[in-house]
């Protein structure tokens, strides 16, 4: 139910959906003769699109998320396992055509292939089923083995978790199938904007992980003003930012994460000793 409600709610919270609702409201108000309210609704629709497409609002929404965790410094000498979260593959296209088409978050799997070569003894757990509600597709855990083996990863190293539909199920199902032992080092690979929520959920599930963020959407130095990127990328960043902040708040309310923005921890995933948001050091 949580997954369905979030999918339906997002249809109306994203900038384009909100703008269309305001346009529809504008037309309805005009038809009933409430012209002042109609103009207000139309103006709000324009404002939503302008702020989303032609300003740096999206980057500013993403900055606190992308800067929360960095890659570990120094990098651990040994890694027992790597968990990569789904979301980087075009499920509907891959279901129809086969292959392994990547989307805007495909860096998750490219980086996983690199890490697999860097840590040749590490197990690789791919977590991601078919999470779409309104579109059929192939789960990332079903597609990714074709990509990773084509990039030279031994298929015997792969652990597939293809039942999860969201980040909460990623954590719960991954812990169940990986059965991590005390003292083991497991890397968590996901988009930088998604890392705070993912780390919080994995900690709440009792699966200590070491964040390895990828797929940055911003340079990190943007200030509020007119966007230097194209309007579609700016609009996408606003959509991603709003969705992630709403998801974080919903997860916190539902008790799926212990914090809106988890603090950095050491490489074993233990509780941090301070509130610094720097990369986790090796001990």
Image: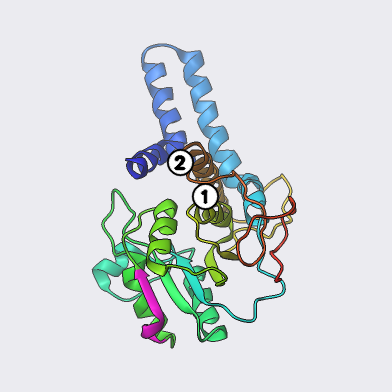
The part of the chain drawn in magenta is 154-160
Comparing 138 with 178, the one in front is: 178
- Who's the residue at 48% across and 39% down the image? 250
Is 66 above or below relative to 155?
Answer: above
- Who's the residue at 69% across and 55% down the image? 272
- Who's the residue at 41% across and 31% down the image? 21
Task: State how far apart marks 1 and 2 are (Cα).
Answer: 12 Å
Instruction: Specify whether residue 277 is in view.
Output: yes
Instruction: Specify whether residue 86 is in view.
Output: no
Q: Quadrant of residue 76?
A: bottom right
List the residue tagged with mark 1.
Answer: 240
Q: Say which quadrant the N terminus sits in.
A: top left
Q: Quadrant of residue 51?
A: top right
Comparing 241 with 179, the one in front is: 179
| SS class, disc 1 | helix
**Percent position of residue 168, x then y:** 43, 51
**Percent position of residue 188, x then y:** 53, 66
List the residue tagged with mark 2.
Answer: 16
- Residue 72: mark: none
The reply to whether dot 1 and dot 2 touch (C-beta < 8 Å) is: no
Q: Say which quadrant the C terminus sits in.
A: bottom right
Among numbered discs 1 and 2, the one appearing first in the sequence: 2
**Percent position of residue 147, x then y:** 39, 79
**Percent position of residue 107, x then y:** 52, 70
- Mark nearest the camera among 1 and 2 is 1
Asked if residue 156 is among those painted magenta in the image, a careful observer would answer yes
Is 12 above or below relative to 196?
Answer: above
Asked if residue 251 is among those painted magenta in the image, a careful observer would answer no
Residue 223 located left or right of residue 98: right
């Amino acid at each position: 139910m949580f997954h369905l409600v979030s999918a339906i709610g997002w249809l109306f919270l994203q900038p384009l959906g909100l703008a269309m609702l305001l346009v529809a409201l504008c037309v309805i108000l005009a038809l009933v003769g409430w012209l002042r309210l109609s103009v207000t609704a139309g103006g709000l629709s324009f404002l939503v699109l302008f702020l989303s497409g032609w300003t740096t609002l999206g980057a500013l929404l993403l900055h606190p998320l992308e800067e929360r965790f960095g890659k570990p410094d120094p990098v651990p000498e040994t890694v027992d396992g790597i968990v990569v979260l789904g979301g980087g593959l075009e499920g509907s296209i891959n279901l129809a055509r086969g292959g392994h088409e990547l989307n805007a978050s495909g860096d998750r799997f490219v980086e996983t292939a690199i890490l697999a070569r860097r840590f040749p003894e590490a197990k690789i757990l791919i977590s991601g089923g078919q999470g779409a509600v309104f579109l059929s597709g192939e789960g990332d855990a079903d597609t990714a083995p074709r990509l990773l083996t084509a990039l030279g990863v031994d298929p015997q190293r792969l652990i597939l978790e293809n039942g999860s539909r969201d980040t909460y199920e990623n954590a719960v199902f991954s812990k169940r199938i990986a059965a991590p032992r005390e003292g083991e080092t497991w890397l968590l690979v996901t988009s930088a904007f998604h890392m705070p929520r993912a780390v919080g959920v994995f900690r709440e599930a009792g699966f200590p992980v070491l964040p390895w963020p990828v797929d940055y959407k911003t340079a990190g130095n943007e200030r509020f003003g007119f966007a230097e990127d194209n309007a579609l990328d700016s609009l996408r960043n606003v959509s991603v930012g709003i969705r992630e902040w709403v998801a974080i708040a919903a997860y916190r309310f539902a008790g799926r994460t212990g914090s809106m923005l988890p603090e950095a921890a050491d490489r074993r995933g233990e509780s941090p000793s301070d509130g610094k948001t720097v990369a986790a050091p090796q001990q």
